[in-house]
């Protein structure tokens, strides 16, 4: 196990920093367990940190920072059971490639794959799906190192109460060392991307959800323009985006040009509405067919700050129209599109989609842009519609709010009290959102 001296840690967006007493990089579950016990012996908090793609401070610590980059790779593939067991520090991008080589795939995934599997699931990372839910909802088992260094195997049959809570555990119950996911034979998706007006999308939102296995869209503030993405299973044949067109649209335009325009908008906010009209009108329709991770995910290199809320699916259109009205009537200048995705109800206590079909609304601003006024105004709209914030994104809610918003909140905190009564895995963020 590598033990390093303390240094300042920053998340991907640069809005969260931490200076731990020491950093450890365990190479096995035994070394991970020993690191947790040593932290306890020294009276220090302990937190695992992945790639830092969370905008919230869920992983920040002034104690022992556990880096999982040596806990990587596939432990086991069980084709009969339809599962894969993977080390917790494995990046999703490595898992996706490895599964594809084995002729397997996750059923659904988010739109980026830089995160570790444990970091992504612990904060509720999700894509969009009519019937298929978040990455955490695809977990069939997990291995958890608890505050006393014990290693627990958890599933619906073994430690079921802990399993139920730990699928989205915020790092509050222990350090995940391995995860078992449900997988299925590799399949193809046909993607259809096309512009639509705001009114057309919102007027036909229910139909678009019903007709497509995976539907999402982006609305460009200061315009009436949206860009829609529909993904459905296909018999093939494979027809991927051409290499040149893929580079031009997904790298040059979506990252390079967008980066330059975002920088311009930050320097000259008055130019943002004009930029939005030009960029939203410049998007063209395209259709392609490929394996899942090549359709679901895309490169995201433009750094931003984000807040995302899940509202009841039936409330999405009203909430989004209120958001548009607020932006139109304000002096705000919003240079990033608003993203809308959906998720079916699940049974995870701290999932924003627990117990109800949901729609996620994500608001973003370019890194370095003042965001407080926009996010505060958006948050007031989302909370008025019984919104639940994404655990890995910015928000101002606290434990009192969550106790009312989540029917099984008390179930989660009871498991936490049992596993970590001394709050070995606590920090300021968890104190705010879960209470003491």
Image (cartoon, rainbow, N blue to C red):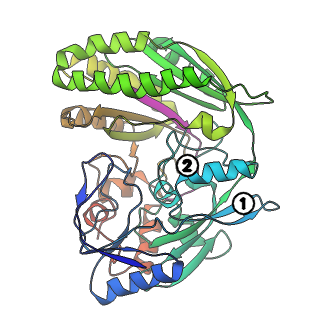
Instruction: Answer left or right for 366 relative to 126.
Output: left
Mark 2 to mark 1: distance in Å?
18 Å
Instruction: Please give the residue where the numbered disc 1 appears in the rendered image.
Output: 83
**Residue 402 part of the magenta segment:** no
User: How far across and how far down the image is residue 407, in percent?
Assistant: 47, 56
* Residue located 54% across and 36% down the image: 342
Which quadrant, please, contains the C terminus? bottom left
Instruction: Say whether residue 319 is visible.
Output: no
- Looking at the picture, tell me which residue is in the foreground, 422 or 119: 119
The residue singled out by tag 2 in the image is 93
Asked if disc 2 and disc 1 are in contact, CB closer than 8 Å, the reply is: no
Characterize the local packing of mark 2: few (<14), some (14-19) or many (20 or more) Cα atoms within 10 angstroms. some
Queried whether the magenta region covers residue 347, the answer comes back as yes
Q: Quadrant of residue 423?
A: bottom left
Q: Residue at position x 49%, y 26% from top? A: 250
Whether 187 is drawn above or below 103: the answer is: above
What residue is drawn where x is 51% and y is 31%?
A: 314
Q: Which mark is residue 351?
A: none
Question: Please, what is the dominant secondary structure of the magenta stretch?
Answer: loop
- Along the viewing direction, whichever of 324 and 170 lies nearer the viewer: 170
Residues in magenta?
335-349
Is 411 left or right of 334, judged from the image as shown?
right
Residue found at the very far front of the displayed protein: 244
- Residue 197, placed above or below residue 352: above
Tell me the quarter of the picture where residue 362 sits. top left
Q: Position of residue 198 (x, y in %)?
A: 45, 14
- Relative image position of residue 63 (x, y in whole percent): 27, 74
Nearest to the observer: residue 76 or residue 215? 76
Q: Secondary structure at mark 2?
A: helix
């Amino acid at each position: 196990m590598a033990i390093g001296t303390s240094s300042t840690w920053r998340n991907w967006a640069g809005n969260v920093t931490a200076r731990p007493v020491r950093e450890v990089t365990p190479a096995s579950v035994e070394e991970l367990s020993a690191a947790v016990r040593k932290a306890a012996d020294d009276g220090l908090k302990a937190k695992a940190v992945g790639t830092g793609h969370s905008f919230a401070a869920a992983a920040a610590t002034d104690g022992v920072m556990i880096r999982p980059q040596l806990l990587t790779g596939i432990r086991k593939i069980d084709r009969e059971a339809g599962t894969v067991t993977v080390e917790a520090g494995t990046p999703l991008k490595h898992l996706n490639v490895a599964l594809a080589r084995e002729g397997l795939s996750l059923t659904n995934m988010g739109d980026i794959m830089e995160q570790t599997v444990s970091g992504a699931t612990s904060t509720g990372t999700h894509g969009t799906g009519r019937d298929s839910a978040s990455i955490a909802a695809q977990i069939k088992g997990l291995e958890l190192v608890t505050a006393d260094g014990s290693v627990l195997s958890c599933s619906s049959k073994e430690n079921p109460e802990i399993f139920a809570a730990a699928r989205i555990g915020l790092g509050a119950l222990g350090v995940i060392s391995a995860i078992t996911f449900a997988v299925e034979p590799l399949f193809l998706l046909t993607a259809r991307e096309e512009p639509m007006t705001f009114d057309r999308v919102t007027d036909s939102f229910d139909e678009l959800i019903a007709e497509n296995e995976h539907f999402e869209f982006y609305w460009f503030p200061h315009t009436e323009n949206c860009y829609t993405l529909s993904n459905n299973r296909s018999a093939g044949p494979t027809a991927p985006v051409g290499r040149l067109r893929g580079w031009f649209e997904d790298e040059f335009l979506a990252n390079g040009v967008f980066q330059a325009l975002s920088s311009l908008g930050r320097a000259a906010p008055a130019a943002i509405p004009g930029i939005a009209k030009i960029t939203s009108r410049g998007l063209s329709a395209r259709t392609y067919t490929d394996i899942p991770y090549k359709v679901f995910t895309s490169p995201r290199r433009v750094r931003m700050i984000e807040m995302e809320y899940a509202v009841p699916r039936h409330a999405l259109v009203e909430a989004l129209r209120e958001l548009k009205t607020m932006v139109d009537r304000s002096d705000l200048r919003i240079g990033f599109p608003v993203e809308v995705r959906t998720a079916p109800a699940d049974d995870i206590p701290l999932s924003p989609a627990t117990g109800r079909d949901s729609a996620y609304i994500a608001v973003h601003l370019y890194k370095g842009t003042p965001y407080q006024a926009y996010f505060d105004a958006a948050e007031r709209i989302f909370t008025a519609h019984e919104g639940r914030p994404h655990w890995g994104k910015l928000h101002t809610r606290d434990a009192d709010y969550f106790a009312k918003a989540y029917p099984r909140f008390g179930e989660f905190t009871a498991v936490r009290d049992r596993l970590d009564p001394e709050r070995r895995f606590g920090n300021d963020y968890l104190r705010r959102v879960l209470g003491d």
